[in-house]
Image: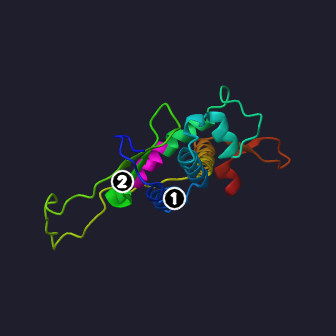
Amino acid sequence: MGESGERIAEEQIRKTLDAVLRTPCFTRSPKLASFLRFVVEEELAGRGAALKAYTIATRALGRGGDFDPSLDPSVRVEAGRLRRTLDEAHALAGPGFGVRIRIPVGTYRPHFEMVEPPSPAAEPVVAPAAAEPAMPTHLVVAFSPRGQTAIIALLTGILLMLCIEVGLLLGGTVPVDRGIGRGTSLAESLR
């Protein structure tokens, strides 16, 4: 049932779920796709009231039976990511899905609402400017958590190498064993 009390056909909800899961937002995150599919299927099966962090962690996210939601916030974190990703998918599709799937804050139970396509008279017709190419209004570049970690490690390594190089250039000495027993600057060792 939708938020405003209207009955939404299960077939229409499943069709929307499949369309949402095919968006780039969800194809790049199998974990979020599994989370969304699980909570929607549980709601459609009449078990939405039983959706708890432990159930989601063990049955949708592949966590072990020793998962403790009071010690591990991962389901809450993933639920926040899921809400943002759902908003992104719906923003990309506009009213094209027909049904909007939402997971309100404070619950894992999905809500469904009908989305009315805009009437043709309501949209103003704007002629594109011939001189200016159409540019996207915003570009979203997202990296997975592993990708973010790799980028941070790479940048940290580069920064470390730069610091060492600057230290050597500013008069640091490099011990060179030439039998003399004294340190030699980098410039001297290169001569």
Q: Is residue 19 left or right of residue 41?
A: left
Q: Which mark is residue 124?
A: none
Q: Is residue 87 left or right of residue 38?
A: left
Say which quadrant the C terminus sits in.
bottom right
Q: Quadrant of residue 135?
A: bottom left
Is residue 167 highlighted in magenta? no
What amino acid is at disc 1? Leu
Q: Residues within 10 Å of mark 2 (few under 14, many from 20)?
A: few
Residue 23 seen in the current view: no
Q: Quadrant of residue 166?
A: top right
Return the residue nearer the eye: 96 or 12.
12
* Start-end of magenta stretch: 83-91
Magenta segment main secondary structure: helix
Is residue 84 highlighted in magenta? yes
Above or below, 119 against 186 in this view is below
Q: Give the residue furthest to the right.
A: 179
Q: Which residue is mark 2?
A: 91
Residue drawn at point x = 49 percent, y = 53 percent: 142
Q: Which residue is mark 1?
A: 21
Return the residue nearer the eye: 186 or 131.
131
